Image (cartoon, rainbow, N blue to C red):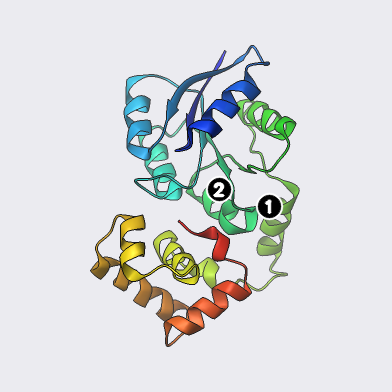
Amino acid sequence: MINILVVDDHALIRKGLKQLLEDNPDLNIAGEAASGAQAVAMLRAQHFDLMLLDINLPDKHGIEVLRQFKLEQPDLKIIVLSMYPEDHYGVRALKAGAVGYINKQSAADVLIQAIRQVISGKKYISEILAEQLLNNLIGESRELMHQTLSNREYQTLCLMASGKSLGDISQIMSLSPKTVSVYRGRMLAKMGFTNNAEAIHYAISHHLVDAQE
């Protein structure tokens, strides 16, 4: 029996995953968490073989939560299940310790295949993500500027581009406005921009607006 922890702040998503997997008798949704903190508490209380983790969580960004999970339980297999395309967070998730990244719009059998693949000791990488990784490896694609940003800097850029104010970003990221301003300054410096407008134009032109929160 493969015991799975689902971490997603949407109850309907958790219910849908449970219904999807119940036709497979060896796959058991043994726990559900709506936040990073709740997931950490559950991991400390019982054993899970696999975690299905969303990027958008109400208390912390999913990539940060992923890193914390891997520090506490290095052997835990984590598949990121996100609404965002692979080119937004796929490489970041793998670097943080995930063994797979799946877009929520993927077919149901893709998720089942991914679960069985990672449980067998392999990683699950879609064709889109595999191509992106290969291009980066052999140097055929120029590294985009936003790929040099930290997760917090990248999140700040995406939220700015989506029209969020400093106060909104501070609330979403659970950080003080002063700290957000620091991340904004670092982001502008790394990307060589002199003002917010240039950064926002870049984010929109590279289709990063949907990668918010």
Quadrant of the rendering where the N terminus is positioned: top right
Residue name at image x 30 percent, y 66 percent: 167
**162 or 140: nearer the viewer:** 162
Q: What's the residue type where badge 1 is placed? A: Leu
Q: Position of residue 113 (x, y in %)?
A: 71, 30
Residue name at image x 68 percent, y 52 percent: 129
Q: CA distance from mark 1 to mark 2?
A: 10 Å
Q: What's the residue type where badge 2 is placed? A: Leu
Q: Which mark is residue 94?
A: 2
Mark closer to the chain start, 1 or 2:
2
**117 or 175: nearer the viewer:** 175
Callout 2: helix, strand or loop? helix
**137 or 22: nearer the viewer:** 22
Callout 1: helix, strand or loop? helix
Q: Label 1 belongs to which residue? A: 129
Q: Position of residue 99 (x, y in %)?
A: 57, 39
Q: Which mark is residue 6?
A: none
Q: Quadrant of residue 174?
A: bottom left
| 34 over 58 or under it: above or below | above
For residue 13, side relative to residue 102 (left or right): left
* CB-based contact (under 8 Å), mark 1 and mark 2: yes
| 39 over 208 or under it: above or below | above
Alpha-carbon neighbours of circle 2 within 10 Å: few (<14), some, or many (≥20)? some
**31 or 79: nearer the viewer:** 31
Alpha-carbon neighbours of circle 1 within 10 Å: few (<14), some, or many (≥20)? many
Residue name at image x 54 percent, y 59 percent: 211
